[in-house]
Amino acid sequence: MNKLYTAQEVADRLKIKKTTVYELIKRGELESSKIGKQLRISEEQLEHYLGGNSSMPEPESPSAVAFPDFRPESSLLKRDYLLHSSGLIISGQSSPALELLINEMSVHPRGLPVLHSHQNTYNGLYSLYFKKVHAATAALMPEQIPPLAPGIALAAFYLYEYNLGFYIRKGNPKRLTCIQDLSRSDIILANREKGSTSRIFLDERLKKSGISPASVNGYAKELVSDLSTADAVICGKADTAVGEESVALQSGQLDFCPLAKIPMFLVMEKESLDRPGFSALTDIIRSEGFRASLQSQVGYDTSRTGELLFL
């Protein structure tokens, strides 16, 4: 009989963190199956990964940052939810703003159940374009959003603005101050995956600066969250990473060098504003309670929270 493993059992066998197992699954390097609502990896799937992977993940030391336990999504589950329920699917990577919005939807008089689809900015807008989600969070400048959903009239609510910049070790021992420093031979970058806001920002800045990604040490190795890249800097596996300021501040072990201020939007089709559930989203985002809750978060600027743009 083909033995089935949990993610934790695979992590124990490979001597890595359980979150790394989920990252391998998300990147498509390790196959998995859904048994009911449970994720399982078969002996055959694990052996296929071990046999076809020449670069096994290195055994990991205890992390310096506490990682939330994100589970990979089932595309069939999301499709069935979309087709057979009155709920909404909202994509976005985990954040206090999105968690608050989803929680408030559950108690709002006109609210609907919400399924959270964990996707980065690019993949979320791609899913919105193909009508796989009803709304997507996107941390981009307004003019960058329409090209990712061509031909669709969009509405975008400001949720908050935040600083994006370098994670650096305390005291900035490598004296990092600008994107050009990434081309130095003594600097190792912990990079984010394609489609994330941090990666989009980095790639644009490298291009504008005339820096080849191939000249940046660590560029080719991708991690799937700001928590992961921050942890790499803390543990000395990298000298810097581009990410959200709040992660650095909350770690208590990093300094932060700001590079740009980025808006976080909730994006949807313009015509959705008149559909059930979206009036509740509007009420929540524009409420004083929502703004006050976000103001309590480290690194969030709520001066434009609730503003609506048509793109």
Image (cartoon, helix red, strand yellow):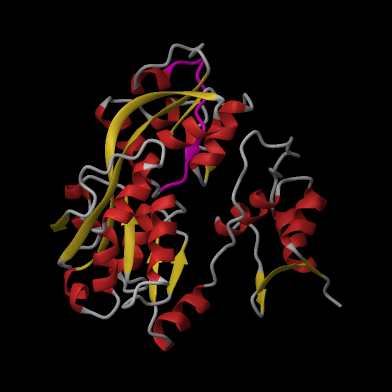
Residue 206 in the figure: left or right of residue 183: left
Residue 270 in the figure: left or right of residue 242: left
Q: Does residue 193 belong to the magenta stretch? A: yes
The reply to whether residue 219 is visible in this rendering is no
Residue at image position (32%, 30%) is: 206
Task: Say which quadrant the C terminus sits in.
Answer: bottom left
The spot of residue 235 in percent (x, y) is 64, 27
What's drawn in magenta, residue-wise? 184-194
| 194 shown above or below 236 | below
| 184 shown above or below 284 | above
The spot of residue 199 in percent (x, y) is 39, 41
The residue nearer to you, when weighing 130 against 214, is: 130
| 115 shown above or below 200 | below
Residue 262 in the figure: left or right of residue 101: left
The spot of residue 46 in percent (x, y) is 75, 61
Residue at image position (37%, 77%) is: 112
The reply to whether residue 200 is visible in this rendering is yes
Number of marks in the rendered image: 0
**Magenta span: chief secondary structure:** loop
Task: Say which quadrant the N terminus sits in.
Answer: bottom right
